[in-house]
Amino acid sequence: PRPILLTRHGESRDNVRGRIGGDTILSDAGEIYAKKLTNFVEKRLKSEKAASLKKFYQNIKIKKCCDSLQLTTVSLQFSCSFSSLFAVIWTSTLQRTIITASPIPGFPKIQWRALDEINAGVCDGMNYEEIKKNMPEEYEARKKDKLRYRYPRGESYLDVIQRLEPVIIELERQRAPVVVISHQAVLRALYAYFADRPLQEIPHIEGVIILLGTLRDALLLEDWPDACDVI
Ligand code: F6P
């Protein structure tokens, strides 16, 4: 079993103003979260890294004794898969996740568009009060069926779930620990997949911010931004 850590990005400047969507940088609290996450990830994955290194060198030694001619091929194969033995950090393409990942040293970082937050279309940049006031029909329609409701020129939860399919396939395939730094709607969908939660519940799941565990043995740790205390 290898750990998978699902975490929301640190608080963004739009989060502070209650605005949805956007692509702002982190607030001061968000920056602190990024640093605490870095400490946590380093601590948590240090032992995994040490174990992988030990296995790596043991394998090289054994192969060397067995057949020195094969050593070059074996080393080549190992160097290709070497980085995949360690953790990888996945972010969305939005600044708030990339900046949250930026202090974490020594692991490959990959950006996935599929990990971007739900696209709020014409409502991007508004807060919920503004939507309620200026677009009451849209507000009510979403309240009635949050799973299927699609923002005008944007996405629904069902759309998000669908675009996460390749991410989930890759998460299942990976042999290394993965740290996923993403967004509220996306993390709800990912969490629901790993925790076997019904589709209808997904848009309403609360507190799925930090999830640590193995693929089938997920452990919900804490809410965000209170996760700072846990980390
Ligand atoms: O408010 C932060 C945010 O990530 C928004 O960008 C996004 O639209 C929203 O959360 C998703 O949560 P909900 O589906 O509950 O509105």
Image (tube, rainbow, N blue to C red):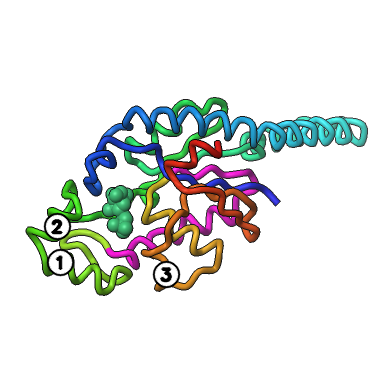
Q: Which mark is residue 131?
A: 2
- Give left or right: position of 49 versus 18: right
* Residue 76 visible here: no
Q: Which residues are magenta?
A: 156-181
Mark 1 and 2 residues: CB-CB less than 8 Å, in contact?
yes
Q: Quadrant of residue 138?
A: bottom left
Q: In the rendering, at what x and y percent does residue 198 appear?
A: 47, 73
Above or below, 171 against 157 in this view is above
Q: In what element is the residue under mark 3?
A: helix
Amino acid bearing label 3: Glu
Q: In what element is the residue under mark 1?
A: helix
Instruction: Provide the residue designation for mark 1.
Output: 138
Viewer-closest of 147 and 230: 230
- Give left or right: position of 230 versus 216: left
Viewer-closest of 105 and 223: 223
Above or below, 16 against 211 in this view is above
Q: Which mark is residue 201?
A: 3
> Label 2 vs label 3: CA separation?
23 Å
- Residue drawn at point x = 17 percent, y = 65 percent: 139
Main SS, magenta residues: helix
Above or below, 39 against 112 in this view is above
Nearer the N terminus, badge 1 or badge 2? 2
- Residue drawn at point x = 45 percent, y = 43 percent: 181
Q: Quadrant of residue 131?
A: bottom left
Nearer the N terminus, badge 2 or badge 3? 2
Amino acid bearing label 1: Glu
Viewer-closest of 109 and 34: 34
Mark 3 crowd level (few <14, some 14–19, many ≥20, 10 Å Cα): some
